[in-house]
Amino acid sequence: MALVSAGCAAAGKYYDPDKPNRTPSGFRNTTPQEPRASLLKWQWERLTQGLPKAPANNYHFPMATPEIAWLQANKSVTSATWISHATALLQINGMNVITDPIFSERASPFSFIGPKRKVPLNITPEQLPHIDVVVISHNHYDHLDQASVEQLNRQAGGPPLFLVPLGVKEWMAGVGITNVREMDWWDKTSAGQLDISFVPVQHWSARTLTDRSETLWGGWVIRTADGAPHPFSVFFAGDTGYSKDFKDIASKFGGFDFALIPIGAYAPRWFMQGQHVDPEQAVQIHKDVHARRSIGIHWGTFELADEPLDEPPQLLAEAVKKAGLPAQEFTVLKHGETIKLD
């Protein structure tokens, strides 16, 4: 009983009757989620059906040769580099921003068990330019990796600014990271010539069996400040199911030059529907937020669900075609690939 009471107290720490996402029992989504499907049923299906199936190319994904020297020197060209999973390096107006960094071999609290990296990492933290800002979408292990944030915090030239959801600042302090700003949905902060806002998406949080929804989750809007020499706007969706939040985001911000939208970990739909979009829903998000160009993330790195690792890009291409969009308007990058967005 003491454990239950302690959990409830932690969950209600941020309760605010004027904030619909903050309840006495923890945070909640804008759109109520369906009752949680059976995890045991899903794991039994995986075991008995031999899922996930291996990709036809046996994990030999085409990989880019990272432009390390260019990335380290770049101060003027707007660019995006997909490192892996939901980790991307954004270079905007001379600022270096990294999303949900994970450089570890496993998306897990343990080094010996848990989802293992299936495609080799070809950009290390040491090869990155000095990172100015790190944005964290939520505290799941494949998005908030302790070793990775600790390594970035130790970078030469001083730690980056870590922007995190409500509740995560305390965890950061516990691992020695103090240059942290904690944000609620629709909060806005500034870093250099960037204005950065935290926005709602459809997901959840947990790092243990007893702390579900005790910290917030969300996406990030990154825009150059008024008067910046090269105006640019980015939407990073983090990890999400489909909801009306994306139309709300577009209503507030008007649209985006570029978006990073998850396309993987969607099968089986009966289990993943409320928390992970499939490629067709990802295309709908692209349209909802009025993105000029989008890149699919959250695929091809860790086996988190039942689809083969190489399937999401195939289904994305079909969904883009079905939606009548140009093929390059929403596509994927190779691991380590950089695109220049000027």
Image: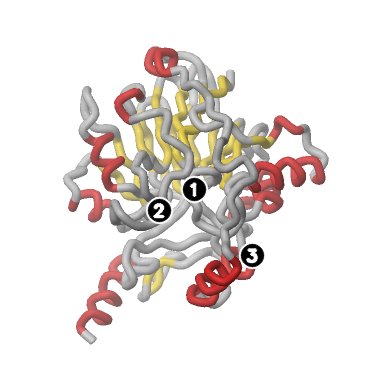
Q: Residue furthest bottom?
A: 1
Question: What whole-number distance in Å separates the C-alpha atoms at marks 2 and 3?
Answer: 22 Å
Relative image position of residue 240 (x, y in whole percent): 54, 55
Cα distance in 3D space between marks 2 and 1: 8 Å
Q: Position of residue 267 (x, y in %)?
A: 61, 60
Amino acid type of disc 2? His
Q: Secondary structure at mark 2?
A: loop
Residue at image x 17%, y 45%? 176
Circles 2 and 3: CB atoms closer than 8 Å:
no
In this view, the mark in front (2 or 3): 3
Mark 1 secondary-structure assignment: loop
Which one is earlier in the sequence, the residue at label 2 or at label 3?
A: 2
Ranked by sequence position, the earlier of labels 2 and 1 is 2
Q: Residue 269's mark?
A: 3
Q: Amino acid at mark 1?
A: Gly
Measuring 70% from the left and 43% from the top, which residue is drawn there? 314
Q: Determine the residue positioned at 32% across, 66% down.
A: 208
Measuring from the top left, give residue 4's x and y in whole percent: 27, 81
Asked whether 184 or 312 is in front, the reply is 312
Left or right of 30, for residue 172: left
Mark 3 Cα shell of 10 Å, populated few (<14), some (14-19), many (≥20):
some
The x, y position of residue 133, in whole percent, is 35, 33
Q: Which residue is mark 2?
A: 138
User: What amino acid is found at the position of numbered circle 3 in the picture?
Assistant: Arg
Q: Which residue is mark 1?
A: 238
Residue at figure coordinates x 44%, y 36% from the top left = 120
In the image: residue 329, left or right of residue 210? right
Q: Nearer the viewer, residue 14 or 257?
A: 257
Residue 249 makes an appearance in the image? no
CB of mark 2 within 8 Å of CB of mark 1?
yes
Q: Are marks 3 and 1 in contact (CB under 8 Å)?
A: no
10 Å neighbourhood of mark 2: few (<14), some, or many (≥20)? many
